[in-house]
Every structure is written in C-alpha cells, then in structure tokens.
C-alpha cells in the first residue's frame, strides 16, 4: 500500500478542525497552561508552576461536562466550567494544595473516574470500550508528542554542538519546545484521537489475547490455588492470617477484576468459566483480606496507607459482591462508588486519612500509656515513670511508635501529652532505649549496652614547641613486609609507627594511649558519649617525651563499664 502524505495531512487537518469546533474550552485551557508555564519559566515564578498544575483538572472537568451535556441545553454549563479556575488560581494556598494528598487524589483518581462516568455507559462492553479508548488516546498522544520533542532536541543539540554554538538561549529554546509539546501538542492530540474513535467498538487483537490467555490468567489460577491452600492451612492450624496477606489478596483481586473486564473485548473467552464465577471464587480470599486488615490495624493502629487500603478494600468488596448477580454487575456503579468514596476521603475533614490515622495512633498511645501507668490524673505523661523492665519493652515500643507518628503529623494533638519527643526519648531507660527508639532487638539481648562515638579532627592550632621534625600525610600499612614511606598500623590493641629509617619506629599500647588522652582531657572514670564528643580537641592528640601525634579521626566503643579505642587514623606526627 502506497503511503499518501497528502491524504494523511488532510485527515489530520479535518480532525483538528473537528476538535476546534467540538472542544473549544479544552483547547483554550491547554493554551492557558502553555502561556502560564512560559511565564513561570521566564520570570522564575515558583507559584506559577502550581497554577499550571491546576489547569489539567479543569481540562478534565470541561471534557467531562462536554461529553455529558452533549448539544442539549446543559451545554451552557460547559461554557462556564472553567470559571472556578480563576479563584483557585489566585488563592494563596494553591501551592501547598498542589503538593498535598487532595490534589494527587483529584488528579490521579477523581479526574479519570469522571471521564469514565461522563459517558453514562450502561452496558459493560460499552464501558470497557470507552475506557480503552481514553487510555489508548492518552498513551498515543504522549508517545507522538514526546517523539516529536525528542527529534526537536536531537536537531537542536546536534546543531549547537556541530557549529560550536554557546549561550543560555539553547536551554531556553529546549524548554520552549518541552512546554509547547507537553502543554499544547499532547492535549490536542489526545482530543483528536478521542474524537476520532468516539463510540468505536474495541476488539482485542492477537497480542492482547496471548497476554491475557497464556500469561496473566494462568498466573491468576496458580495464585488462586495458593490462596486456597493458605486458607486450608489456617483452618487446619486454627490460626489467624498474617497482616501482610491483606496486601497480597488486594493485588490479586484487582488484577483479576481488570482481566475480567478485558475479557469482554476478546473474541474467544477461553477462561470465561473462571471469570464468570470469579465473585464466588474471590469470597474466601476476601475473608482473608479483612482478617489481615483487622489484625494489622489491631496491632499497629491506622496509618495513612492503611486508611487508603481499607478504602480500596471497601471498593473491591463492593465490586465482588455486585458481580455476584449478572444483572446487577455494572462497572459504572463501581466507578461511581469509587468516585464518591475517594471524594469523601479527600475532602471531608473528619474522614481524611491523615486525621483518621492521628486519632487512631493517639488512642493507641493513650491505651498503652494507661497500661504502663505513664499518665497522671490530667492525662499527661509522667516521664519519671518510665521503667527498664524488659518484660514491657514491646509495650514501650508500641507507645513510642505512636507518639512519634503523632509528633510528625499533628503537633496540636501531640501537645496534649505534655512532653516533647526529645524528653520522651531521653526518658526511655538505657537498657531498652535502642529497642524502643530504633527497634533493634539485639540491644535488649544483653544487660550491657554499647555505644560507638566517632570523633573527627577540625582545624586547630597544634602546640609544636620543642619538636624539630614534622611528618605529614601518613598511610596505613596492612602487612609487616609492606614497603613505602612512613606509615602506621593499628592492630592487636597496638599503634605501630614506621618512619622508614628517618626516626626509630615506635609502638604504643592502646591502653597507654587512651590513658594519656583521658588525662590530657581531664576525664576520670568512664565518660558519657556527650563528654567524649565535647572533649574531641584533647582526645585527638597524644604526646610523650619523644613525639606528638595528631589523629585525623578516632572511634571509641563505650559501655557502662568499659571504654576502648576501636579505630584510629593518624594525620600528623612530630618528633623531638
């Protein structure tokens, strides 16, 4: 077949004219985003990028209203659907809103669901076809726009390299191309393809058939068998499923439901017997899911991801139960339920995941604190009541996890406890502190808790009076027969200095070196980690009747009863 460029150009031109007639508001919004992006880039206007990010939401809103209203009297709403963009753009909090969860949920969940709902497709076949048309139009539009952008970049940077062109204008031209393609070309191509394939019937091709029938569906059957075997194991052993099973069941069910929908576009449904009865098949895994969620939430309380998991679980359960009856199973009802559920979670303050999680963690912290008797009669923490009994270390760990979660996300709720995190952390007894604060099991296994303190040399005047020779830039040697300039070795609790014949070699026992360092710093007994850090200027020096050593760094291993040097790095040595 001969390729006719004129014919292709004519089809493209006619399609774009159709887009201009049918989607004027969407095109104007894309142009607005392009202009705002240009202005933000040229002026270095950080707030402008947030305003650009708002435009895609109104692009989807206008497109949804356009498809929903058609050419009837409701089309007047379409012509004014962009107007809320004005107050939102001048709102001072738009930058924070764009960086928050509400914007992410609106752009990634509510906007796509609105596009799917605007067609009001009652038949599942029509709903799936519309979904595939939207997805295919978006992917191809981005592909063509980015291919064009890549070719433009290749021409631009190749030309500047070949002819030796320099200047900031090159970056500006590249950014202009990027902005133009992503904000204007890609949306226009998306509208062009969506309009061209509007109301088209989608039929699965050979690639999709192979992918679903020979790869994905067999894997789903194997996974189903695994979940059923796990269910049988739980029934036999009379145990509860692990909390993480909820995530596994959720992933399995969502993939299966998507494949079930794609079965409608296949010519041959080899696994129709499985997907027609999938709602019945999914009931035992669904029970596992909710038991796993209950166990996870019961042990650790709600967090934001777990709130979203519960919301997705509710939608998944609704879908499975809805498709138990063929007559009631409609994807548009699932889509509408998802839109309503996520809109409530994003925009109803009492249901927002962050607030639900903070309330849950606060309730958990107060329950554990009451069990450990850490609260006074006003409900405030009594830090002097923290005990070192390892019997309750798990409770202390749960309490610390909850208060740390609250402190990071809601300072007002945290202030009810009447203490700050530094005070709470310091109040945890030393024998269980590493476990409670960091979750390190090994720290609680022994009664003696060790601590590593690292000291680094900073610029300081060295007292060099009385010394005649300076030896800088010391290297470490590892073998006794190693040759080279003056070097040192720290092993077997001994520091060995080699001067390569320029001065007699010297060996210093680490115990003598440590005693001299502590004496120089005026430290008696086993110092605290803070004391060692405060005395770094004195601990990084050693001197005796023959020489002075300046250490680049040193590491001390400290416990309640011992202090030893675990690492040394020599920087400078001076001899008399």
Image: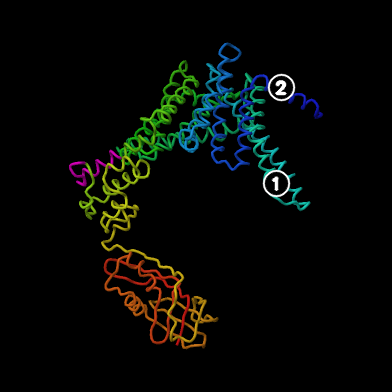
The disc label shown at residue 501, or none: none
Mark 2 lies on residue: 17
Relative to the observer, which residue lies in front, 557 or 536? 536
Residue sitting at x 66%, y 42%: 175
Q: Is residue 372 magenta?
A: yes
The image shows a total of numbered marks equal to 2
Q: Nearer the viewer, residue 527 or 91?
A: 91
Q: Is residue 457 magenta?
A: no
Q: Check disc 1 and report the residue beneath it.
A: 169
Dot 1, how many residues are within 10 Å of its Cα: few (below 14), some (14-19), or many (20+)? few
Q: Secondary structure at mark 2?
A: helix
Residue 335 in view (yes/no): yes
Label 2 crowd bin: few (<14), some (14–19), many (20+), radius 10 Å? few
- Location of residue 282 with respect to 66 vertically, above or below: below
Residue at 44 percent across and 18 percent down: it is 325
- Per the rendered image, the range of residues in magenta is 362-378
- Residue 146, how many percent across, how many down? 66, 38
What SS does tag 1 mark? helix
Can you tell which quarter of the image residue 430 is in? bottom left
The x and y percentages for residue 76 are 57, 15
Rendered location of residue 142, percent (x, y): 64, 34
């Amino acid at each position: 077949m001969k390729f006719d460029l004129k014919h292709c150009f004519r089809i493209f031109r006619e399609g774009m004219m159709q887009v201009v007639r049918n989607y004027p508001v969407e095109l104007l919004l894309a142009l607005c985003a392009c202009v705002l992006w240009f202005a933000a880039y040229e002026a270095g206007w950080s707030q402008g990028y947030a305003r650009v990010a708002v435009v895609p939401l109104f692009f989807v809103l206008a497109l949804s209203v356009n498809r929903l209203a058609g050419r009837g009297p409701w089309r007047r709403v379409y012509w004014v659907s962009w107007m809320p963009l004005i107050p939102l753009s001048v709102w001072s909090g738009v930058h924070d809103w764009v960086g928050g969860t509400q914007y992410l949920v609106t752009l990634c969940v509510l906007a796509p669901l609105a596009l799917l709902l605007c067609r009001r497709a009652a038949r599942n076949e029509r709903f799936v076809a519309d979904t595939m048309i939207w997805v295919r139009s978006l992917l191809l539009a981005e592909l063509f726009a980015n291919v064009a952008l890549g070719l433009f970049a290749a021409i631009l940077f190749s030309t500047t390299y070949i002819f030796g062109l320099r200047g900031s204008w090159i970056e500006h031209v590249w950014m202009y191309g990027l902005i133009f393609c992503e904000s204007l070309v890609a949306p226009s191509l998306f509208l062009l393809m969506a309009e061209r394939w509007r109301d088209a019937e989608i039929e699965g091709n050979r690639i999709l058939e192979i992918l679903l029938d020979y790869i994905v569906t067999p894997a789903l059957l194997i996974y189903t068998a695994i979940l059923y075997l796990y269910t049988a194991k739980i029934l036999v052993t009379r145990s509860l499923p692990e909390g993480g099973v909820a995530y596994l069941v959720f992933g399995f069910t969502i993939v299966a439901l998507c494949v079930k929908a794609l079965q409608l576009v296949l010519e041959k449904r080899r696994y129709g017997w499985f997907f027609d009865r999938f709602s019945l098949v999914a009931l035992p895994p669904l029970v596992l899911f909710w038991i796993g969620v209950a166990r996870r939430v019961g042990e650790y309380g709600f967090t934001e991801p777990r709130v979203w998991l519960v919301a997705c679980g509710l939608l998944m359960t609704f879908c499975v139960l809805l498709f138990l009856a063929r007559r009631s199973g409609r994807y548009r009802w699932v889509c509408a339920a998802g839109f309503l559920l996520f809109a409530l979670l994003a925009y109803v303050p009492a249901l927002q995941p962050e607030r639900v999680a903070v309330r849950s963690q606060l309730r958990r912290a107060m329950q554990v604190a009451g069990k450990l008797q850490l609260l006074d009669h006003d409900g405030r923490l009594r830090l002097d009541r923290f005990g070192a009994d390892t019997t309750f270390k798990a409770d202390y760990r749960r309490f610390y996890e909850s208060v740390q979660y609250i402190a990071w996300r809601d300072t007002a709720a945290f202030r009810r406890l009447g203490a700050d995190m530094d005070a709470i952390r310091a109040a945890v007894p030393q024998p269980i502190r590493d476990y409670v604060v960091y979750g390190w099991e090994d720290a609680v296994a022994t009664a003696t808790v060790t601590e590593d303190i690292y000291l680094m040399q900073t610029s300081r005047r060295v007292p060099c009076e009385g010394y005649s020779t300076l030896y800088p830039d010391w290297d470490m040697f590892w073998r006794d027969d190693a040759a080279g300039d003056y070097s040192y070795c720290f092993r077997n609790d001994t520091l060995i200095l080699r001067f390569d014949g320029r001065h007699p070699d010297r060996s210093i026992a680490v115990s003598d070196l440590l005693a001299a360092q502590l004496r120089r710093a005026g430290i008696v007994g086993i110092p605290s980690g803070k004391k060692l850090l405060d005395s770094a200027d004195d601990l990084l020096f050693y001197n005796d009747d023959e020489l002075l050593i300046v250490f680049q760094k040193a590491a001390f291993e400290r416990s309640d009863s011992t202090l030893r040097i675990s690492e040394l790095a020599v920087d400078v040595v001076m001899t008399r």
